[in-house]
Amino acid sequence: MEESTQPSHQHLTWEEFGRITKDFAREVARVFKPELVVGIAKGGVIFGATVASVLRVDFFPIKLSRRILAEVVQQEPMFHIKPYAYAKDKTVLLVDDVSESGETIMIAKRAIEKFDPVDVKTATLARRSGGYKPDFCAIESDSFIVFPWEYEYLEDDEFVVNPDMGSDPGYQKL
């Protein structure tokens, strides 16, 4: 696991994401042999699909959230895309982008376990110390990590920096 300094914001570049993901996949493969990676949308799908590709295993997405787009629309996380029987008799790596309370990933894990997988391990790209600790984690940091898919967006055929990213004087690259 990568330890990081603690500025208030850290920007993870695509290049760093690739390096960290490859190192993470190697770490997972040393102790767990998933046959299937399940990614929780939105960020867990990006990280999960990349991990699944590196490990050369199947990948499926699920969506479990309190939000629709950026707006919180319900107090409890709810499935928008549910897991189904693809997990039966498989070792499963359940992936999300970040873990704080662990509520979302634990709801997803319980739902997958209803399909009788051999084993389900949890993994996140990042986690906050003191919060839920997944079975595997690539980065531990109390800073707000800006993932590469969050930093810029397309507006009127131009890529623009998300105005919510990088405005803090404590912001730095990871």
Image (cartoon, grey):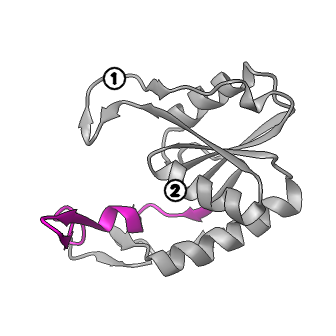
Let me know if residue 139 is in the magenta part.
yes
Which amino acid type corresponds to the residue marked 1 in the rendered image? Gln
Question: Which quadrant does the C terminus fall into?
Answer: bottom left
Let me know if residue 123 is in the magenta part.
no
Residue 142 lies in quadrant: bottom left
Q: Is residue 149 visible?
A: yes
> In the image as oriented, which residue stretches furthest toward the top?
114
- Which residues, given as a range, are shown in magenta? 138-167
Question: Could you tell me residue 12's position as x and y percent?
Answer: 44, 73
Q: Which mark is residue 46?
A: 2
In the image, residue 163 above or below residue 68: below
- Residue at numbered disc 1: 75
Of residue 35 and residue 70, the one placed in the foreground of this image is: 35
Q: Is residue 102 left or right of residue 52?
A: left
Question: Could you tell me residue 63's position as x and y percent?
Answer: 48, 34
Q: Which mark is residue 87?
A: none
In the image, residue 19 above or below residue 61: below
Between the residue at mark 1 and the residue at mark 2, the CA separation in whole angstroms equals 25 Å
Which amino acid type corresponds to the residue marked 2 in the rendered image? Ile
Question: Could you tell me residue 105's position as x and y percent?
Answer: 57, 36
Question: Could you tell me residue 26's position as x and y percent?
Answer: 78, 68
Say which element carries label 1: loop
